[in-house]
Image (tube, rainbow, N blue to C red):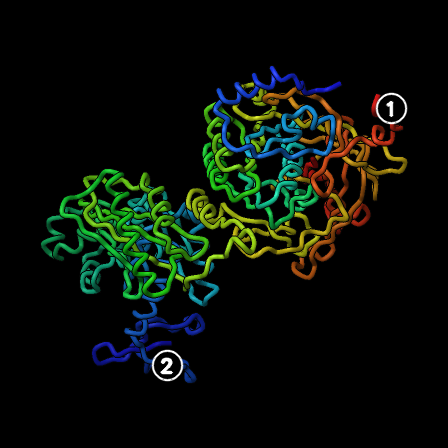
Amino acid sequence: MLAARVGNRRLVTAACAVAQELGLTVGMPVSKVQAMVPDLQVLPHDPQADAASLERLALWVLQRVSPIVAVDPPDGLVIDSTGADHLHGGEEAMLETLIGRLVMSGVTARAAVADTWGAAHALARHVAVPMHVAEPGTAEALLSPLPLSALRLPPATLASLRTLGFVCIGDLLHQPRAPLTRRFGPDLCRRLDQALGHASEPIEPLRLAELVEVRRAFAEPIAAAETIARYIGKLVVQLCAALEERGLGARRLDLLCWRVDAHVQTVRVGLARPQRDPQRLTRLLCEKIETISPGYGIEILSLTAVMVEPLDARQMASSLLEAPAPDLSGLVDVLANRVGARGVYRMAPVASDVPERSVTRIAALSEPVGAGWPDHWPRPTRLLPRPEPIETLALLPDHPPVSITWRGIRRKVARADGPERVFGEWWKRDAEMIAVRDYFRIEDEAGERYWVFRAGDGEHAETGSHRWFLHGVFG
Amino acid sequence: MSARSFNPAIAALRAQIARMEGDGGPERGALPFGVPELDRRLPGGGLALGCLHEVAGGGNSAVDGAAASCFAAGIAARLPGQVLWCVTQADLFAPGLEQAGLGPDRVIYVEAGDDVSVLACMEEGLRHGGLGAVVADVARLSMTASRRLHLAAKGSGTTGIALRRWRRQQDAYDFGQPTAAMTRWRVSVLPSAPLPVPGLGRARWLIELIRARAGESLDIELEACDGTGHLGHPAALADRPAQAVSA
């Protein structure tokens, strides 16, 4: 529990989950709380340390999620994910990953995606459990039932609004604006408009001193693709010089384009290995120019290396010794920036007998894994994303099917091989304690070969449903 | 029977046609299949390297692409260097590819959203020049797209294999459309030879060389790729006495 001095009283400013279960709430006087729970641990509230750690968290998010991240004090972060969410597999997947990674590092977080900063702020604090993705254009309907405290208003305004009988945001929406403004100042209506998207609210992106950043402001706004490409080239040269000075190579670059109308367009490129080769970086950035919409023109271009790694000069291998292995990092970078970093991968073996768990995706440029899979049983070349149920005619307990019906087509089995018994991974999941699959390779009369399995061992009902599935196709 | 003509006049004409097609540049050699009947039909005595080739499955394999991808994996396995495999749906099973000779360390997968970006990724891979082969699962392949890919392959010397795979059986008629590919193959499965014991023998394919530029087409029945990516003669043929083979 944290306590701080507000005015001349000591109040609770934060309480952990255990304390909240004991009936403590934020805002109670410390003396009362200590009377309720005698062996309570009370630590002084340190706003500066909070702010510093929030900033560290913002940097962490900046490096991983989106180029535009800002601190939303006292306890929030605001992320402009435009153009960044598809790299994480959509908005929902992005939030899920983000929350999951925060939980793993011991931070409980709630998150929401909405059209505006104001709406996202309100939804994250009042609707998200622990995440919420709002459809575009639904802000008004979603915000109406929320309490007024979701609007980022000063406590004095909130108290007097409550006195006037306003409880939720919906009550305020259809009130005449003029009296409200006269009574509470322009802030109230501005917050309402910001939440509903009637007023713009630019996010000033967080830029820390330790990041390597170069920027260029233009006297006349630029818009043509060629002009942008030329200036990107100039910025990259500057950035690479700055990186070289510090002995660093960039892993992730953000290009921010401030437009005349205060919108910011962003381009983010990732690199598989630290790089500071201007030519290669320029090419990656220039491929993305078509995603920038310059609007009325761009007045500032800024290029930041948000993620850097040490990169020392290395001696090139002499061609006298041996032909060096071709460097694929350039190709992998180009492909990863085109289809997303998770779209370029290699497969590596996992020690598991369950076929779909025996492969895992690893980074395209990771070290060779060397070993492959055990090859005493043939494996299909194409594995269905999930086993498809089939109708079969088979003798229990260990005969292959005589005929199968898959996707509406009946095939007579001419030859078969099996069973290959695969046991559930009881040491990992309790549910698989006695689960069994019996795999058969079957060949129909035309020569098509399929990989089918029966869930269960054919004798004991608790080992599986005894239904048949088709799992793969052999070449 | 000699499949290739050694008439100097015809050779001169072939050279002239090659010049007109703009296929100049260094000769990249060919990758023999190790099956004399097949290699004899192909110009250069094997699959021309640094070119675009097309492979499709016959029958159901046109949709699941299993036999065709095994055939393509066998070719890629016998080429040195890394292999880039561009797909739209990630249903390739790496242990299966390894059994065709293509180990997990040699394949980089690219999962692109649609056909257009698969072709773009394939072209990018072909242009890079550091790869051994580039394979891509594509459904539609226009003349223009295939010409681009072929020129990219020519420029860098990387072999490209367009693995034609359609969403529906009916779409497979698209395979008749002209493309710039050097060769066009169709791989269909055949019933394997019965074993004296219950079980499955080595898979058997009907390999149709439908089109080969400056070569002849051919239908041949062969056994599927072994662990090193080599095709084999059916046992009945291989066990035949020597004079029967030459006859």
**Mark 2 is on which residue type?**
Val
Chain of the residue displaying label 2: A
Query: In terms of depth relative to the viewer, which is nearer, A34 or A223?
Result: A223
Of circles 1 and 2, the one toward us is: 1
Q: Residues within 10 Å of mark 1 (few under 14, many from 20)?
A: few
Q: Which residue is mark 1?
A: B244
Q: Is residue A172 visible?
A: no
Q: Quadrant of the N terminus of chain A?
A: bottom left
- Measure the C-alpha gap from mark 1 to mark 2: 96 Å
**Mark 1 is on which residue type?**
Ala
Q: Position of residue A440 (x, y in %)?
A: 77, 41
SS for callout 2? loop
Chain of the residue displaying label 1: B
Quick check: marks 1 and 2 in contact, CB under 8 Å? no
Q: Which residue is mark 2?
A: A42
Query: In terms of depth relative to the viewer, which is nearer, A49 or A274?
Result: A274
Q: Quadrant of residue A62?
A: bottom left
Q: Residues within 10 Å of mark 2 (few under 14, many from 20)?
A: some
Q: Position of residue B14 (x, y in %)?
A: 57, 19
Up/down of A451 relative to B190, above or below: below
Horizontal arrangement in the rendering, residue A180 relative to residue A414 (left or right): left
Up/down of A437 relative to A37, above or below: above
Q: Of all residues shown, which one is farthest toward the top?
A: B9
Q: Residue at x 69, y 39 (%)?
A: B229
Query: In terms of depth relative to the viewer, which is nearer, A158 or B246?
Result: B246
SS for callout 1? helix
Up/down of A393 relative to A48, above or below: above
Horizontal arrangement in the rendering, residue A393 relative to residue A289 (left or right): right
Query: In terms of depth relative to the viewer, which is nearer, A240 or B99?
Result: A240
Q: Residue at x 76, y 18 (%)?
A: B1
